[in-house]
Amino acid sequence: MDFVLYHNPRCSKSREALALLSARGLTPTIVEYLRTPLDHAALRALVAKLAVPVRALLREKEAAYAELGLDAVLDESRLVDALVAHPELLERPILVHGERAVIARPPSRVLELLP
């Protein structure tokens, strides 16, 4: 079963997670989500694999978070809409393996999915 890493090469935590995987001989499929944003279905599937509320995927320090007033939004569908429209809001890195996933903050969390 393959590993998929939702990755931002400009993010040090994302690079660290990739390095941890590489050091263990794993070459995940890389999804640069800023270049190839996730759609609604992909985000919903990711939330299900992570088993967290949508809000856990949001980067609260991004300018778009404040601009969109996401602190006040409780409706998960609206939060998914915001993530689709503003992929920079997606927390990273995220590693997926089969039906499980982790937000790799800290990057060592990728180890939770290794066999």
Image (tube, rainbow, N blue to C red):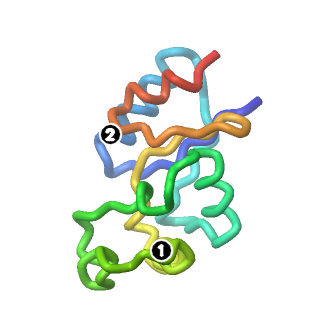
Front residue (pair 98, 13):
98
Whole-percent x, y for residue 1 in the image: 77, 29
Front residue (pair 69, 24):
69
Q: From what the image shows, is residue 39 above or below residue 53? A: below
- The local secondary structure at tag 1 comes to helix
Whole-percent x, y for residue 66 in the image: 24, 78
Q: From what the image shows, is residue 29 above or below residue 2? A: below
> At x 52% / y 60%, what residue is drawn?
33
Label 2 close to label 1 by CB (< 8 Å): no
Please identify the quarter of the rendering in which residue 93 is found.
Answer: top left
Taking 47 as reference, is 55 left or right? Answer: left
Q: Where does label 1 land, which residue? A: 79
Q: Earlier in the sequence, mark 2 or mark 1?
A: 2
Q: Which amino acid, mark 2?
A: Lys
Please identify the quarter of the rendering in which residue 95 is found.
Answer: top right
Q: From what the image shows, is residue 28 above or below residue 77? A: above
Front residue (pair 63, 29):
63
Callout count: 2
How crowded pointer 1 is (Cα within 10 Å; few <14, some 14-19, many 20+) is rated as: some
Whole-percent x, y for residue 79 in the image: 47, 74
Of badges 2 and 1, the one in the foreground is 1
Instruction: Compute the Cα span from label 2 to label 1.
Output: 23 Å
Q: Which amino acid, mark 1?
A: Leu
> At x 50% / y 80%, what residue is drawn?
78
Taking 64 as reference, is 48 left or right? Answer: right
Taking 36 as reference, is 64 left or right? Answer: left
Give the number of the disc on residue 13: 2
